[in-house]
Image (cartoon, grey):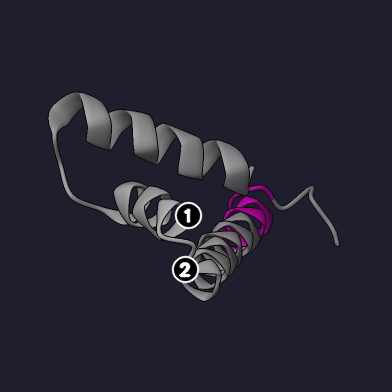
Amino acid sequence: MAISSITSAVVTESVFSLPGLGKLIVNGASNRDYTLVLGLVVLVTVITVLFNLLVDLAYALLDPKIRY
């Protein structure tokens, strides 16, 4: 899931000429700044996991039949 988010960010930023995390990851990889790339991948992964957790908790609040 995180890889598709990064890939879609790169494509969107390239099509619309926007600066963002996708271009930062690509520039970091081309400049061999591996700590930057690793940090950004971890950041995107943590954000994805947190949003998935929030969605699961929202499901539990909205539908009382769901039990965890």
| Residue underneath mark 2 | 33
Q: Which of 25 and 20 is in front in this view?
A: 25
> Which residue extends farthest right?
68
Q: What residue type is labelled 1?
A: Ala
Q: Nearer the viewer, residue 63 or 7?
A: 7
* Number of marks in the rendered image: 2
> Which x, y percent locates residue 4?
56, 36
Please state the extent of the stretch shown in magenta in the rendering: 54-63
Q: Tell me the distance, in whole angstroms, between the alpha carbons under discs 2 and 1.
A: 6 Å
| Residue underneath mark 1 | 29
**SS state under label 2:** loop
- At 31% from the left and 48% from the top, the residue drawn is 23
**SS state under label 1:** helix
> Which x, y percent locates residue 14?
25, 31
Disc 2: CA contacts within 10 A as few (<14), some (14-19) or many (>=20): few
Circles 2 and 1: CB distance less than 8 Å? yes
* Quadrant position of the C terminus in the picture: bottom right
> Which x, y percent locates residue 59?
64, 50
